[in-house]
Amino acid sequence: MTLDATVIDTYPITPYVMGFRLQVPGHEFEYDPGQHTTIQFNSGSEKIVRPYTPTNLPGSDELALTIKRYDNGLASSYMHQKRPGDTVTIGPIEGALTLADTSRDVAFLASGTGLTPMMAMLRQYLREGTGQAHVVLGEKREETIIHRETLNELAANNPNLEVTFVLSDPNWEWTGRDGYAQDHLEELFDEFTERDFYVCGVPPMVVQTKERVAELGAPDERIHSEGWEDSAVDED
Ligand SMILES: Cc1cc2nc3c(=O)[nH]c(=O)nc-3n(C[C@H](O)[C@H](O)[C@H](O)COP(=O)(O)OP(=O)(O)OC[C@H]3O[C@@H](n4cnc5c(N)ncnc54)[C@H](O)[C@@H]3O)c2cc1C
């Protein structure tokens, strides 16, 4: 089943990433935070369907999407041309990356737009969770960090939330951690057996990060991802 949604606002998040508020008046979106919808349209004779993950909580008639534009990317370029008042077709909301347990501590390990499911799950956890949450976001440079202000404000307002940014290509002013986020995990977490690890990003990052937390002691049932990334890396 598809729905026609109206774009009610668009806003820059970083030079390549835009935010979109989509609305289907009178419709209440029901989903588990972390799940994704799809944007669907025709390009010539081809039907294009691409997943995008709401960063907001369910229960309203709106979805907030965060979309990075790729220069030759069909759906991301299509979306970046949308303006308030335009209509887009969205598919059902589904997906396997959702919060397993709100009573355990959680680590959200993301790179780039892999942060989008984490934003929704983090919002759910800050409402319902009873433990500690730690977001570790890997990005290239300061200016490409998405949702930095939001994460910092959430951390300032929630003593049970910690946020760490790790930049792979920082400029000289950066005083935070640098390199790849997965190389910092041993220092960032004092134990790996009890908390849940949620991992999302480009497939190589997901695979390497899952391997690293497993090496550090996390049991399989505590490591959560969409699940398709291993085969995407095998195919490369
Ligand atoms: C479950 C799931 C949830 C997702 N949620 C989001 C989200 O919330 N926000 C978001 O921005 N994206 C998200 N994506 C990615 C999104 O679905 C598209 O793959 C992405 O927007 C590119 O689609 P496109 O049609 O613009 O590019 P395509 O036309 O498919 O690709 C054209 C070219 O773009 C480049 N390209 C495409 N994707 C990538 C990439 N990931 N890294 C580097 N180069 C690339 C390649 O050069 C490629 O050849 C999600 C993907 C999945 C599987």
Image (cartoon, rainbow, N blue to C red):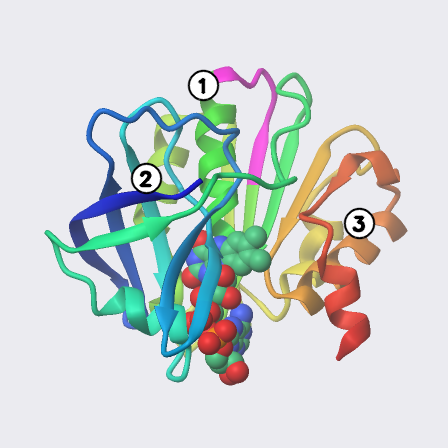
| Numbered circle sitting on residue 127 | 1
Q: Is residue 60 visible?
A: yes
| Numbered circle sitting on residue 63 | 2
The residue tagged with tag 2: helix, strand or loop? strand
Q: Nearer the viewer, residue 54 or 167?
A: 54
Q: Is residue 190 above or below residue 19?
A: above
Outermost residue on the left side: it is 85
Question: Quick one: label 3, few (<14), some, or many (20+) residues within 10 Å?
Answer: many
Mark 1 residue CB less than 8 A from any atom of ligand 1? no
Q: Earlier in the sequence, mark 3 or mark 2?
A: 2
Q: Which residue appears at 61% of the width and 71% of the height?
A: 179
Q: Are marks 3 and 2 in contact (CB under 8 Å)?
A: no
Mark 3 residue CB less than 8 A from any atom of ligand 1? no
Give the left or right position of residue 65, taking residue 141 as reference.
left
Q: Which residue appears at 62% of the width and 29% of the height?
A: 99
Quarter holding residue 15: bottom left
Q: Position of residue 44 (x, y in %)?
A: 36, 79
Give the left or right position of residue 156, taking residue 184 as reference.
left
Q: CA distance from mark 3 to mark 2?
A: 32 Å
Residue 132 magenta-highlighted: yes
Quarter holding residue 56: top left
Q: CA distance from mark 1 to mark 3?
A: 26 Å
Q: Earlier in the sequence, mark 1 or mark 3?
A: 1
Which residues are drawn in magenta? 128-134
Quadrant containing the C terminus in the rendered view:
bottom right
Q: Nearer the viewer, mark 2 or mark 1?
A: 2
Q: Which residue appears at 61% of the width and 34% of the height?
A: 98
Q: Amino acid at mark 2?
A: Leu
Quadrant containing the N terminus in the rendered view:
top left
Residue 165 magenta-highlighted: no
Give the left or right position of residue 115, taking residue 180 as reference.
left
Please give the residue where the numbered disc 3 appears in the rendered image: 213
